[in-house]
Amino acid sequence: MEPPAGPVLYQKLLLWDPSLGFEDDEEKETSELVAPDTRRPHDSLGRNKFGGLPGAWARLGAALLLLAVGFSLAARQLYTRGNPTGSLGSAAPRPGGHSHHPGVYHHGAIISPAATCSHLGRELLVAGGNVVDAGVGAALCLAVVHPHATGLGAMFWGLFYNSTSRTPTALTSGPAQTLGPGLGLPTALSTLHLLHTHFGRLPWPQLLVGPATLAREGFLVDAALAAALAARGTKGLCPLLCHADGTPLGPGARATNPKLAAVLLRAAVAPTPDLAGDALLSLLVRDLGLQGPPSGPTPALEPALQLAMPQGLLSTTPGPSAGPELLTVLEAALRSGGPSPDPCPVPLQAPVTPVGSVLATIDSSGSVLLLASSLNSSFGSGHLSPSTGVLLSNLVAKPTASAWACPLILHGSSDDTEADVLGLVASGTPAVARVMSHALLSHLAAPQTQAQPQHEQGPTPSTSVCGQGTLLQVAAQAEHAHVSSVPSSCCTFQGF
């Protein structure tokens, strides 16, 4: 059954825990202004401000948002200038001396491979957004700062669990389509917009102005992007990611992508998402000298695949992702009753170049969004569109095209309102289904580890994901949001 077309409301996200009190009335007033009451109608002043105005006023509104978000991101970039890998997250003491270990938050959290994008996602949460707003905004940010792993040319898969309705929904990009010989049809904008239209809360332009600011004003090359550049070389990527002499940018160097910024801003003010997608495709077709794409992208929201088990319900994405394979592996392991299988039976001789990106957002009520995206190889096809700044994928129609995607959520049944929620998502390994199975079974075998400090435990006993890739874990437990990753140094978490 197709998901409802209307927006979904979550529990109110406050800046401070009401039980802790406020130091003064001024603090309380500020909290209410920054995190508005979500029980108001969805078509609030913020959304009407953009959705119903003519193009000129919409562009003015987007420009004002661009300025505001630009200041925030500029401050974040200056803070991380001396450390391009960014902070792993923090848990500052709360009013009254109440604090948590890093990775544990009262209201909501996000974890992603880029410090700047985790910060942007947190800011969207604090501004009154939900996990979908934070995840989509961070995904668009990663499309700018991590072009080796994701981008507007990437294919996206997602899994969203709504704690209010207690239903899981899968996000798919539709069948892989070819734009040109060896080039995949871009689907990111239409796919992420579809997700936001059904489940987001903030105005769509507010999610794009931050990434557009980074693309226009510049972003710092982090260690992950620098390593991918050094491994691949800069052929086809200049001048975007090169010095004047053609050498690749290193950690801490500043890169800009003004053409991509223009695409994002055009998508922010387009009257309909179809027009934004058509404008991007028309520019790509012109760059490639093609007659036109066979058809536009066909993203969809579908019921998640589910597997019942004693601890709750497992949900994942349908085929052609690796979700069905994941459930098959889990069913076999559960029937055998033995130890979880080794996810890496044959050690790899060398790390594999990352082919995708993952992120996860969660709130303390248990709503979760897991997103996985891929260009199919490092920097995709290596074809940089001069008119759009978009790197096209080489993710063409093949039976194994989406074998990298299988986000997983463990949650209670529809009548179990007090159950904890666990989310897992991995990338960068061909054995992703086995890795996910191993992580889940390890978690179920030792649930007491959740009571340990987050910096002392992770989702699996392993210290790596088959020597490559990343594994993210998010959980809602005891009215708190928990985030962690394997390896612990791969990703940055932010929350409040």
Image (tube, rainbow, N blue to C red):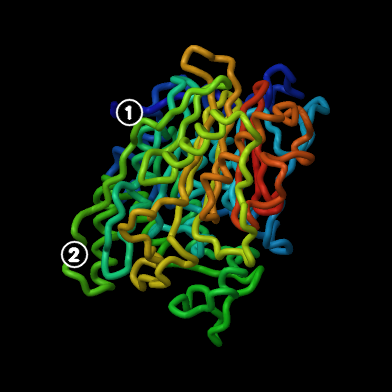
Residue 292 figure quarter: bottom left
Looking at marks 1 and 2 on the same chain, the residue that comes earlier in the sequence is marked by 1
Q: What is the secondary structure assignment of the residue under circle 2?
A: loop
Q: What residue do we see at 54% from left, 65% from top?
A: 218
Rendered image: mark on residue 147: none
Q: What is the secondary structure assignment of the residue under circle 1?
A: loop
Label 1: which residue?
A: 3
Residue lying farthest bottom? 245
Q: Nearer the viewer, residue 182 or 125?
A: 182
Q: In this view, does 336 lie to the left or right of 257?
A: right
On the image, the x and y values in percent for residue 131 come to 51, 35
Q: Which of 231 and 241 is in front in this view?
A: 231
Report crowding for label 2: few under 14, some 14 to 19, many 20 or more residues within 10 A (C-alpha): some
Rendered image: mark on residue 292: 2
Q: Nearer the viewer, residue 212 or 66?
A: 212
Please tell me whether residue 163 is drawn above or below residue 471 in the rendered image.
above
Please tell me whether residue 64 is drawn above or below residue 185 in the rendered image.
above
Which residue type carries mark 2? Gly
Q: Is residue 246 left or right of residue 171?
A: right
Residue lying farthest left? 291
| Number of numbered labels in the structure image | 2
On the image, the x and y values in percent for residue 211 come to 49, 54
Please tell me whether residue 336 is drawn above or below residue 291 in the rendered image.
above
